[in-house]
Image: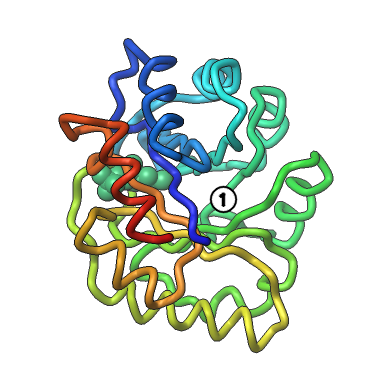
Amino acid sequence: MALIAPSILSADLSQLAQQIRLVEMGGADWIHCDIMDGHFVPNITFGPVLVKAVRKVTKLPVDVHLMIENPDNYLEDFKQAGADHLLVHQEEVIHLNRTINKIKELGMKAGVVINPATPVSTLEDIAEYIDILLIMSVNPGFGGQSFIQNSFRKIREAVNLRKNYKAKFKIEIDGGIDSDTILPALKAGVDVFVSGSAIFKSDNITAATTQLKNLVQ
Ligand code: DX5
Ligand code: ZN
């Protein structure tokens, strides 16, 4: 059964608790938080303070996607804030094995994220150690962008990587997921779907969540 992880990047943050309640009622499985620092990506969002606020209003796993420079400096802060999953970018972390171990030692699930131009093959030597592989299907930084088509091939490559290395990670996809792209992505092998604008910019947030959820059941 595939999972839905609404991204609060596109939510109305002045009504955070209520917006999270709406996606919970629609059947959301995780809450996805996009942390951007204006350096790794050309946008600035929020940090541990907001993750702490999310933690306060939901019991769902909080999935934290770090799009920041030097993420190693902030692992403890996000643990303290209540993150359940911490995902770091392959392009930013030099000692990925060390960082993944640290995240797990802190008691969180550890994920690696790859940008659209980063090959899945770069993860061969980390595959067996990670809990989540997040494939970016847009260039990170903003919600509401179009799904990059070669992501389907990358999903299939991730499925093969998992099999060939006897790994157990979930395959998560992030960017441009809506009622059109979700089914081919499911067919290619995705386990977890991040969706921002298709859910929070819709007229009925609960119904939009349920619609995506039903499509992947
Ligand atoms: C983009 C973020 C995404 C974003 C997805 O950098 O990582 O999580 O919220 O938004 P949509 O679903 O609108 O593409
Ligand atoms: Zn994200």
Q: Residue at x 35, y 30 (%)?
A: 44
Q: Nearer the viewer, residue 104 or 207?
A: 207
Task: Reply above or below: 69 against 157.
Answer: above
Horizontal and vertical percent position of residue 177 = 28, 55
Q: Residue at x 49, y 59 (%)?
A: 2
**Which of the four quarters of the rendered structure image does ligand 1 lie in?**
top left
Picture quarter containing residue 196? Answer: top left
Horizontal and vertical percent position of residue 131 = 67, 59
Give, as a three-letter code, the residue at label 1. Val
Residue of label 1: 88
- The quarter of the picture where the C terminus appears is bottom left
Q: Residue at x 80, y 39 (%)?
A: 106
Task: Reply above or below: 39 against 111.
Answer: above
Horizontal and vertical percent position of residue 65 = 50, 43
Badge 1, how many Cα within 10 Å: few under 14, some, many 20+?
many
Q: Nearer the viewer, residue 189 or 213?
A: 213
Q: Residue furthest top?
A: 14
On the picture, is 170 further left or further right than 210? right
Q: Nearer the viewer, residue 155 or 210?
A: 210
On the picture, is 102 further left or further right than 23? right
Residue 141 visible in this rendered orientation of the protein: no
Horizontal and vertical percent position of residue 59 = 62, 27
Picture quarter containing residue 170? Answer: bottom right
Q: Secondary structure at mark 1?
A: strand
Q: Residue furthest right?
A: 105
Residue 111 visible in this rendered orientation of the protein: yes
On the picture, is 133 further left or further right than 213? right
